[in-house]
Each structure stands twice: as structure tokens, then as C-alpha cells.
Image (tube, helix red, strand yellow):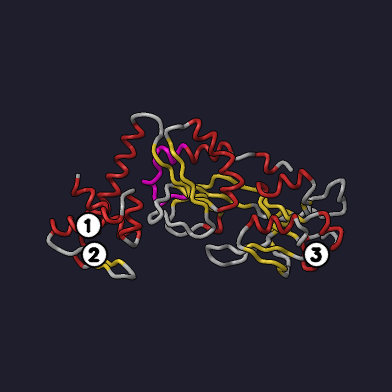
């Protein structure tokens, strides 16, 4: 078992990019991980890693050894998970990555009921709009909207969320109400920059089956949805918000949804904005353990249908 622990320290150090980061994945100290690797090198009679102040690199022997032992460590972790979960309810740590807004507005309200149903599962949340690496950050499952998907991940669609273009009543009283998407060119538009790739999230509409993007000039750009939400509430302009962010304020009258004719705004032209599609993502199919599967199924079942009712 000591040899396996040493091999695991070596594999995790390579995957995480440093001995200290690999040790965190193992739940041990950096000193203990370093000793494990040194013990392994002595037993093999060769150096596996070259340590410098800036980076960690494998020797030629290390690369050959890593290619052979990495699949073994992954298979052992999978076997441990299968046996543990076979013996009873899903259990153990479930590390979940998510965009900040989805975590704050959706996961925080859903997770308490999940943990009551599965008390042996302990949740760790990692909320970030930047790219999350499943290996180096030890993520079991990440929730991403379509524009955040990356090559190599296994993804399952779990929700389609309506998107609403909203503004505060005070802003609309001052600047007027855009009756059509084309009228957005004369308004203050609050745009979201996607942290993963640095691109602006487009404002796309569907009219009679044809997709189009009206010409707009952003007045404020931000890489945080909740900040754009706040700016819209303060009357700074028009924001594109997921229903789970905007619905409560729409119900209170703090925000007005645009391009949706109503008794209060009968002249507004209807225009359908493209929804956000959310996916559960995994490193590979072997990462879909029982605890991951029950959480994913729970999200599909519990994500509220009321998002589309306004």
C-alpha cells in the first residue's frame, strides 16, 4: 500500500503541475507527498521528476513510468468508488464546479434537499466563470452553459433556461421602450464578456425561424452576470439575463421584460431570444460514478419549470 500511495503522489503531482498541488488532491501535506515520490524514486533506482523553482517536469524515465501507472491509479480510484457505492447509498465527497451565477441562483437552492436525501455525500462547490480543469482541480462534475463547453469533456444537457432582455422602469421612462430588437441600437446595452474565451455573449433573436443579431453598441461590459443584473436594477441600461436571475425582480416590478407584449406594453413586438443551454460535464465516461449520476438526475428533475412561466 505504501508503494501505491507513492505512485499516487507521483501521478497527482504530474497532473496538478506541482507536488504541493498534487498533495492537495490526495489530502496530504506537500512534505509527505515529496517523501512518497523520493521513496518511489529510490525503489526504482531512477529520477522521475526534475524539480525547479518555476516548474515540475518529468525525466525520460518519468514519462515512461507515468504512461504505465496513470491508468492503474485511475482504475483503482474507479474500483474504490464502485465498491463503496455498491455497499449502500452514494457517499463520499462530491466536488462540483459551476459558473458563479448558476451556483448562486440555482445550486444554492437545490443542494440542501439533495444532501438531506443523500446524507453520506459531502458537497464541495467551486464557483468560477473561468475554465475549471477536472483533473488538476479534482472536479467530479461541472455545470456549464453551452458557450463554456470545451473539447474533450463528456457533456449531458440538463436544462434549457429562458433568456430575458430587461431594464428598470426608470430607465425606460427616461430612454423610451424599444419596441423591436432593431431599436436596441439607440439604447444603453449592458453586455457580458465570457471569461473562458474573452468573447462577448451575443444578443441573438429568432424571428420566423431565422436567427439574427441586431446592431448594438455596448455602454458597459462586465464579466460578471450579477454585476450586470445590479446595473440594470440601478437604471444603467438593458441587460440580457437568464430567467433564474431576473424572474424575482420581474415579479416585483423592479425590472421590465422587453419584446413580450402585455397589457402594460401592448405595442411591443414579440421577439424570441435564444435560451441558455446548461450541461453537466465530466472528464470521461468513467467519471460518472453513482454519486455523480444521482446528482445529475436530481438536477434534471428539480430545475424549476417555472422559469418559463413568466
In the displayed orientation, state which residue is furthest to the top. Answer: 88
> Bounds of the magenta span?
281-294
Front residue of 275 and 247: 247
Along the polypeptide, which appears first: circle 1 or circle 2? 1
Inter-mark Cα distance, 2 to 3? 61 Å
Q: Is residue 45 left or right of residue 178?
A: left
- At horizontal 27% and vertical 56% (from top left) the residue drawn is 31
The residue that mark 3 highlights is 183
**Where in the figure is residue 157, as x and y percent of width and height?**
53, 47
Mark 1 or mark 3: which is in front?
A: 1
**Of residues 122 and 166, the one drawn nearer to the viewer in this rendering:** 122
Q: CA distance from mark 1 to mark 2?
A: 9 Å
Q: Which residue is mark 1?
A: 37
Labelled pair 1, 2 in contact (Cβ < 8 Å): yes
Q: Quadrant of residue 167?
A: bottom right
Foreground residue among 20 and 99:
20
Q: Position of residue 4 (x, y in %)?
A: 21, 48
Residue holding disc 2: 49
Q: Is residue 223 left or right of residue 293?
A: right
- For image coordinates 82% across by 50% down, the residue present is 261
As helix, strand or loop, the secondary structure at mark 2 comes to strand
Q: CA distance from mark 1 to mark 3?
A: 64 Å
Residue 284 in magenta stretch: yes
Amino acid at each position: 500500500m505504501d508503494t501505491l500511495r507513492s505512485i499516487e503522489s507521483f501521478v497527482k503531482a504530474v497532473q496538478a503541475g506541482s507536488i504541493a498541488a498534487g498533495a492537495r488532491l490526495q489530502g496530504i501535506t506537500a512534505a509527505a507527498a515529496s517523501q512518497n515520490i523520493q521513496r518511489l524514486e529510490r525503489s526504482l533506482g531512477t529520477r522521475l521528476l526534475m524539480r525547479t523553482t518555476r516548474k515540475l517536469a518529468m525525466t525520460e524515465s518519468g514519462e515512461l513510468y507515468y504512461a504505465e501507472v496513470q491508468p492503474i491509479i485511475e482504475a483503482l480510484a474507479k474500483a474504490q468508488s464502485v465498491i463503496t457505492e455498491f455497499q449502500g447509498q452514494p457517499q463520499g465527497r462530491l466536488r462540483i464546479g459551476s459558473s458563479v451565477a448558476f451556483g448562486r441562483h440555482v445550486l444554492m437552492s437545490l443542494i440542501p434537499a439533495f444532501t438531506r436525501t443523500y446524507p453520506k455525500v459531502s458537497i464541495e462547490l467551486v464557483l468560477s466563470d473561468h475554465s475549471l480543469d477536472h483533473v488538476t482541480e479534482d472536479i467530479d462534475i461541472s455545470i456549464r452553459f453551452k458557450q463554456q463547453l470545451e473539447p474533450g469533456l463528456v457533456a449531458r444537457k440538463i436544462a434549457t433556461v429562458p433568456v430575458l432582455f430587461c431594464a428598470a422602469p426608470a430607465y425606460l421612462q427616461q430612454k423610451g421602450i424599444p419596441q423591436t430588437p432593431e431599436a436596441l441600437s439607440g439604447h444603453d446595452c449592458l453586455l457580458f464578456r465570457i471569461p473562458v474565451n474573452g468573447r462577448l455573449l451575443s444578443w441573438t433573436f429568432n424571428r420566423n425561424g431565422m436567427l439574427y443579431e441586431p446592431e448594438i453598441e455596448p455602454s458597459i461590459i462586465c464579466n460578471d452576470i450579477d454585476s450586470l443584473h445590479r446595473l440594470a436594477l440601478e437604471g444603467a441600461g438593458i441587460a440580457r439575463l437568464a430567467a433564474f436571475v431576473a424572474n424575482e425582480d420581474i415579479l416585483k416590478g423592479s425590472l421590465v421584460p422587453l419584446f413580450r407584449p402585455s397589457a402594460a406594453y401592448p405595442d411591443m413586438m414579440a421577439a424570441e431570444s435564444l435560451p441558455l443551454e446548461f450541461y453537466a460535464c465530466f472528464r470521461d465516461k468513467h467519471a460518472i460514478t453513482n454519486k455523480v449520476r444521482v446528482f445529475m438526475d436530481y438536477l434534471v428533475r428539480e430545475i424549476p419549470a417555472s422559469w418559463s412561466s413568466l
